[in-house]
Amino acid sequence: MSKISKLFKGSSSSSKSRHRTGASPQEAIHKLRETEEMLTKKQEYLEKKIEQEIATAKKNGTKNKRAALQALKRKKRFEQQLTQIDGTLSTIEFQREALENANTNTEVLKNMGFAAKAIKGVHQNMDLDKIDSLMQDITEQQEIAQEIHDAISQPFGDQFDEDELLAELEELQQEELEESTKSMGRLPSVPSTALPTRPSHRAHSKKKVEDDADMKRLASWAS
């Protein structure tokens, strides 16, 4: 067997082995991201080349028509490659998102399965009879606690009948009303002391004459 045959046989067997094993979702996503980055760089390169060919065509123009046309032809080829890369990137992006979603769903289902098993294991360790007994004990203790609270909250000391107190208050109010009515029925008494009398006109005249005489004597002394 030739060396070439051995080489192809070995590569074929290794390819079949890889196909049987298959790549993990994480590896496939990583490879797709690397491809996206490579194609994105190729896009940037082609865009720069297109700008350069446009500049070359403008520069030559009518001076060198052949060089200008060659530049435009290269620009067209670069644009075709750019369009193809755009389509390839869209396909790879769609494939990567589908793979990421599938991987996420797989992880979610796996975790939900673990949780379901855990819940099942917890329930298997539970005894329904013990749960009922525990709830009865809790209810009984709550009732005892309520009785203790009611007993503690009752007031100590003398306790009076509220109806009797209201009746007594009504009697007091009635007595006060009767006293007020009696006070309003009495007339005011006549004062015993004599009222001050108004000075007579004669006494006032006498006082005025005496004042005039005093004024005259004071005037004569001053002169």
Image (spheres, rainbow, N blue to C red):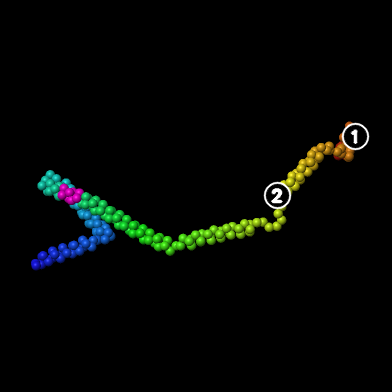
The x and y percentages for residue 141 are: 56, 60
Query: Considering the numbered disc 1 on the image, is that residue within a helix, a strand or a loop?
Result: helix
> Residue 215's quadrant in the figure?
top right
Query: Considering the numbered disc 2 on the image, is that residue within a helix, a strand or a loop?
Result: helix
The crowding category of the residue bearing disc 2, from other C-alpha atoms within 10 Å (few below 14, some 14 to 19, many at least 20), is few
Quarter of the image where the N terminus is located: bottom left
Is residue 138 toward the left or the right of residue 8 in the image?
right
The CA span between labels 2 and 1 is: 75 Å
Residue type, numbered disc 2:
Glu
Magenta segment? 75-84
The x and y percentages for residue 192 are: 89, 39
Q: Is residue 15 magenta?
A: no
Viewer-nearest residue: 181 or 58: 181
Is residue 2 toward the left or the right of residue 190 in the image?
left
Is any part of residue 98 visible from this angle?
yes
Q: Is residue 77 magenta?
A: yes
Residue type, numbered disc 1:
Ala
Is residue 140 toward the left or the right of residue 117 in the image?
right
Residue at horizontal 13 percent and vertical 64 percent from the top: 8
Residue at horizontal 18 percent and vertical 62 percent from the top: 16
Residue at horizontal 12 percent and vertical 66 percent from the top: 6
Instruction: Give the mark, 2 or 1, whose residue is nearer the N terminus.
Output: 2
On residue 86, the disc is none
Viewer-nearest residue: 153 or 62: 153
